[in-house]
Image (cartoon, grey):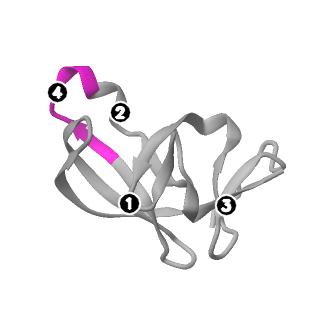
Amino acid sequence: MADLGGDASASFRCRNCQTPIALRSDLLSKRFLAKSGAAFMFSHARNIMEGAKQDRQLMTGVFCVADIYCTNCGQELGWKYIQAYEPCQKSKEGKFVIEKAKILKQY
């Protein structure tokens, strides 16, 4: 399990098992929607495993994505953008969308 390093007082952790997932400095946007409602976009995520790649119709178009899971407890957290098919969405590639309901912010 990877430690986040840096300022651990500003990190996001798995709500289920408290495993570190991302730093505050990794947060790119709080304006996403997922299955359970609000979601955040992060530039990096740690202690996650990726599921199978699949094309999925999302609100902003069709993307190749992989669901992501906590490596410690297996909780589904959100998804990773693998490929954007529309040029205007390419900036999302490699980014992680994590459901707000699945993480806790630790100060």
Q: Is 83 in the magenta?
A: yes
**C-alpha gap between disc 3 and disc 2:** 22 Å
Identify residue type, mark 4.
Glu
Which image quadrant: the N terminus? bottom right
Where residue 82 appears, as percent x and y from the top left, is 28, 44
In the image, the segment drawn in magenta is 81-89
Mark linked to residue 35: 1
Which numbered marker is on residue 86? 4
- Determine the secondary structure under disc 4: loop
The answer for how far apart the CA atoms under marks 3 and 1 are is 19 Å
Q: How far apart are marks 1 and 2 (CA)?
A: 18 Å
- Mark 1 or 2 closer to N-term? 1
Is residue 33 a member of the stretch shown in magenta? no
Mark 3 or mark 2, earlier in chain: 3
Q: In which quarter of the image is residue 72?
A: bottom right
- Would residue 73 appear left or right of 55 to someone viewing this image? right
Location of residue 90 with respect to 56 vertically, above or below: above
Residue 9 in the image: above or below residue 85: below
Spatial separation of the CA atoms under disc 4 and disc 3: 32 Å
Q: What residue type is labelled 3?
A: Arg
Query: Which circle's residue, 4 or 2, is located before the other in the chain?
Result: 4
Q: Mark 2 points at which residue?
A: 92
Depth check: 42 or 34 in front? 34
Packing grade of label 3 (10 A; few <14, some 14-19, many >=20) is: many
**Residue 11 at x, y = what percent?**
73, 50
The residue that disc 3 covers is 13
Q: Which of marks 1 and 4 is nearer the N terminus?
A: 1
Q: Find residue 105 and report its horizontal and vertical position in percent.
A: 72, 54
Q: Which amino acid does label 1 sit on?
A: Lys
